[in-house]
Image (cartoon, rainbow, N blue to C red):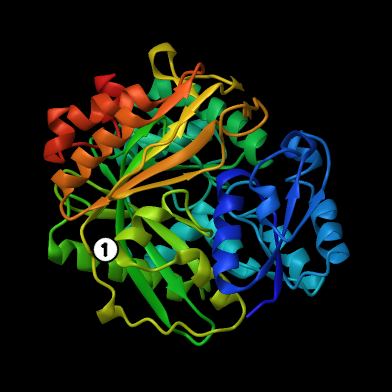
Amino acid sequence: MFSRILIANRGEIAQRIIRACREMGVQTVAVYSEADRHARYLPLADETICIGPADPAESYLNIPRIISAAEITNVEAIHPGYGFLAESAQFAEICRDCKIQFIGPDPESMRVLGDKVEARKLAARAKVPIAPGSEESVPTEDEAARLAAQIGYPVILKAAAGGGGRGMRIAHNEMSLRVAFHSAQTEAASAFKKSDVYLEKYLEQARHVEVQILADRAGNAIHLWERDCSLQRRHQKLIEETPSPALKADLRDQLCKAALRLAKAANYVNAGTVEFLLDKDQKFYFSEANTRIQVEHPVTELVTGVDLVQWQLRIASGEPIKLRQKDIGQNGAAIECRINAEDPANGFSPCPGRIERFFAPGGPGVRLDCHVHAGYEISSRYDSLIGKLIVHRRTRAEAIACMKRALEEFEIGPIKTTIPLYLEIMSHRQFVKGHVDTGFIERTW
C-alpha cells in the first residue's frame, strides 16, 4: 500500500479521499487554488500546497503544476477524483512517465473508452448491445441527415470525446438535425478541444442504468450491481438510486455481465462504470463508460458495504481484489440527491454566493458528503455541487421516507438550492411507483 498520495481535486471528493486514506493509514497531500485556501477539509490532510489562482486552467487543470506539487511533496501516487483531470489519458501517461502511480485505469484503456466511437466498436466486439448509429464520427450535416433517414427519427448527436452531457443534441426531423449538428460540434470543440460527433438512435422514455465494476492487474473483475440515474436534466444526473426499480433479476444479471465483458475487452484496471440505456421494451444498449470514481458512488457503497475509494487505492498499489462476486449482495435501498447551488424555479440558474445558514440533516440512515458550511462562499468558477445527501434503508419506500425527512431538515441559505425540487420529486406519484425516465424532470417541471 502507498504511504503518501496527492489528491488532484477539490471540494467534497477531495474530502472523501482524505477520509478513506486516514482510515488506511495513508498520508495525504491536498492541493488547492487560491479560491479554496480556507477550505475546512484542508487541515484534515497531512500537507497542503497551493497550485495557482482560482481559474481551473491555472490550478486544478494545470498538469505541470500538479506534477511539480507531487514531486516536491514526495508522493508515490495521485488520485484525480472526478472531473478536472480524472479522465485525462494524457495526465495518466505523464504520471506514468514521472514514475508516479495514477490511481485509476491505464491511459490506453482511458483512450479507447474515452472515445465514444471507439468504445461503441469495442462494445460490439464484446457482444454488448449498442443502439443503431454511425460506425464512425459524422463529418458533415449532409452525412448526418443521410444516416438519420436510415436509422429513423428521433436521433441524438453525441460528442465523440468527453461526457457530462455536453455536445449532445436531440433531433426529431432533418431541419432540427442540421441545426443541432453545428451546435453539437461547437460545444464539443469548446468543452473537449475536439469537434467530432457521432449519431445514434434516440431512445424515447428510456432509463439510464449504470453498472459499477472493479478490476485488478491479476485479471480479476467483479461488478457491484447497478445504479439507476434516470432522473436528469439536460443529461446531467440529479438523483441516483440502487437497486433500480426497473430491473428484474434476470435482466439485472444480463446487464452486469455485459459490463464485465466490456471491462475485460478494454483490459480495464481499477474502478469504473459502464452506462446503459434501457428502453420501454426492457432492452438495454451500451451508452458510454466512465473511467473514474462516480459522483454517485456512495449509494453503491451503502448497499454493498464496499468502500470503493479504498479499493481504488488497493488496486492501484498492486493488491488483488479479494472480494468474490457471490459475496457481494444488495442490502436494502439507497438514494442520493445532488444538492446544487441552483434555482429550479428560475431555469436552474446558478446561485453563487455566501452561505449564511447551514444546518445539516442526520439521524438513522443518513449520510452527507459535503464540504461546505456557514460562511462558505460558493464560487462561480467551479461546479455548483454543494454536496450529496444519501440515505440507506431496508426498502425503497423506507428510503424515500427517510430522504423526505432529511431534505426537510436540511437548511441552506440565503442562496437557492435544488432541495425544494427534490422534496416535490420524493412525493410525486410516478417517482414513488418507480415509473420515471430520463425525460421525467423536464416534462414534469
Residue 270 in sight: yes
Left or right: 365 in relation to 2 = left
Query: Where residue 114 sits in the image (x, y, percent)?
Result: 56, 56
Where on the picture, by quarter, is residue 146?
Answer: top left
43 in relation to 177, above or below: below
Residue 287 visible in the displayed image: no
Circle 1 residue? 255
Which secondary structure lies at badge 1? Answer: helix
Return the x and y of residue 222 as percentages of the image width and height: 37, 75
Q: Is residue 348 above or below residue 141?
A: above
For the point 72% across and 71% down, which residue is it? 4
How far across and how far down the image is residue 326, in percent?
25, 80
In-image side of 256 versus 216 (left or right): left
User: If the image is split into quadrants, where does the N terminus sit?
Assistant: bottom right
Number of marks present in the image shown: 1
Kindly indicate the quadrant of the structure image that contains residue 125: bottom left
> Label 1: few (<14), some or many (≥20) within 10 Å?
many
Instruction: Identify whether 59 is placed above or below 109.
Output: above
* Along the line of sight, the residue nearer the viewer: 150 or 96: 96
Q: Position of residue 439 (x, y in %)?
A: 29, 30
Q: Residue at x 14, y 48 (%)?
A: 281
Query: Left of 17 or right of it: where is 49?
Result: right
**Quadrant including the C terminus:** top left
What type is the residue that disc 1 sits on?
Leu
